[in-house]
Image (cartoon, rainbow, N blue to C red):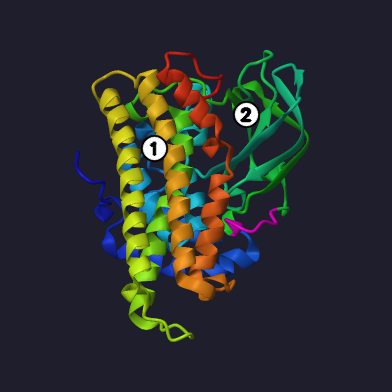
Amino acid sequence: MSIAILDKSKWGGSEQFDNLLSDIRVRRNEFDEQRYISHDVVEKFKRIGIYRAFAPEQFGGDNKTPAEFLQAIEAISAADGSSGWVASFGMNPAYLAALPLGTIEKVWKDSPDVVFAGGIFPPQPAKKVDGGFIINGRWQFASGCMGATVLGVGILPDVEGGLPRMAVLQPDQVEIEKTWNVHGMVATGSFDLVVKDVFVPEEWTFVRGAAPVLDSPFFRYPSIAFASQVLSVTTLGLAREALDIIVAMSEVRKSVTGAPLIGDRVYAQIEMAKAEAKLRSSRAFFYEATEDAWAAVTAGGKPTPQQTSMIRLATTNLTRECAEVVQTAYRLAGMTSTYYDHPLSRIFRDSQMATQHAFMGEITYQNAGSMLFGHKPLPGYL
C-alpha cells in the first residue's frame, strides 16, 4: 500500500494551503488567549474546502475521500493542534445526513460550507410535544462552536439503552458560556452550550450514529469510527512537528552545561530512531485501516464489523503512540521545552489532552479484543 501523502492541489492549491498554515503558526498565541480559533481562519478553512469536503454532492460538496480529509487535518494540526481539531469537524455531514431529507435540503440550501458543532454529553431529557421537543439544558465540550453556522445538543434516546438523539438549532437559539479553562487544546473553544425553553421540530433531530438517508460512498463509511479518526489524527500532526523541532534544535542549540548538540548525543540518536519508527508504524496502521474500509465502500458494499473495529483500534493506537513520540521529543529538548511559550510545551499539552477523549479510552481495546475473540462489542462502539 502506498504511503498517504497530502495532495494540496485538492485543497485550494499549494500556495493557498501553505499560506493558511503559515498564518496559523503566527497566530497560535492569539487563538490560545481568546480560547477559540478566529473567525477569519474558519472562513479560510471554508475557502480551501474543509467544510464542504463531505457535503452532499447535489449541494456542492467536493466528494473527498476519508484519507484525503485525514491528511489535510494532519497537516493543519502540525501547525496548531487546536486548529486541526476545529477543522476536523468538517466531517459532520456524516452526522447531519441522518436528518430527514427535507431538513437536509434546508441545511445546505444556501452553501455547502456548513459549520456544525455540538455538545451531546450529557444527553438531557427533552419534553415531547406536538411536532417536536422543548429543549432545556447545558452541554459540555462543544468544540468549534464559536464559528458554527448550526449547533447540535444531545437529548435522551427515545428508548432506554438506545443511542442519544441530537437536536439541531440555530446559533441565536443557544447561549455559549466560555467555560473552557484547560491546559491543552486551549483554542478549540470547547465551551458549554446552554438552551432554555427552545422548541425544536422533530424533523430537526436525528439519532447520532444512525444510518444516513443519503446514499453515496462517504455515507457508507462508518460515521462513529470516522468521528474518532478525525480527532486522533491531530496527534499525528503534532508528533511530526515535535520531531521536526528536535531536528531543528540540534543544529543551533548548545547546552548551557557544555554538553554536545542534541544530534550528537548517542542516547538522543537512539530515542529519535525509536520515535520515528513509532510514528511511522502507527501512521501506517491508521491509513491502512482507513483504505481497507474505503475499498469495501468503493466496491459497492460496507465495511465489515471487523474492518470498522480495526479503524477504532488503529485510531486509539495512533493517539497513544503519537503522544509518546511527543513526550520523547519533550524530554530530549530538556529544560527549554518547559517554558510555556516554547512550541514543544504547547504540543506536549495538546497531545496529552487528545489522549483524554472518550474515543481514545481503554474501552477501545476491550471492544477490539472482544471482537478478535468472536464476541460482540459494547453498544455504540461500531
Magenta part of the protein: which range? 180-186
Left or right position of 113 against 38 = left
Q: Determine the CA span between mark 1 and mark 2.
A: 19 Å
Q: The N terminus lies in which quarter of the figure?
A: top left
Circle number at residue 166: 2
Q: Secondary structure at mark 1?
A: loop
Could one spot residue 265 in this view of the protein?
Answer: yes
Q: Position of residue 73 (x, y in %)?
A: 40, 50
At a point 63% along the width and 60% down the height, the residue shown is 35
Q: Position of residue 240 (x, y in %)?
A: 37, 58
Q: Nearer the viewer, residue 351 or 205?
A: 351
Left or right position of 50 against 301 = right
Residue 301, relative to residue 340: is it above or below?
A: above
At a point 56% along the width and 26% down the height, the residue shown is 208
Q: Position of residue 197 (x, y in %)?
A: 80, 33
Residue with the most extreme front position: 266
Q: Quadrant of residue 305?
A: top left
Residue behind mark 1: 54
Sequence-wise, the earlier of marks 1 and 2 is 1
Could one spot residue 109 in this view of the protein?
Answer: no
At a point 48% along the width and 20% down the height, the residue shown is 370
Label 2 is placed on what type of residue?
Met
Answer yes or no: do the residues labelled 1 and 2 have beta carbons within 8 Å? no
Q: Nearer the viewer, residue 142 or 170?
A: 142
Magenta stretch contains residue 200: no
Residue 343, relative to residue 285: is it above or below?
A: below
Q: Quadrant of residue 194?
A: top right
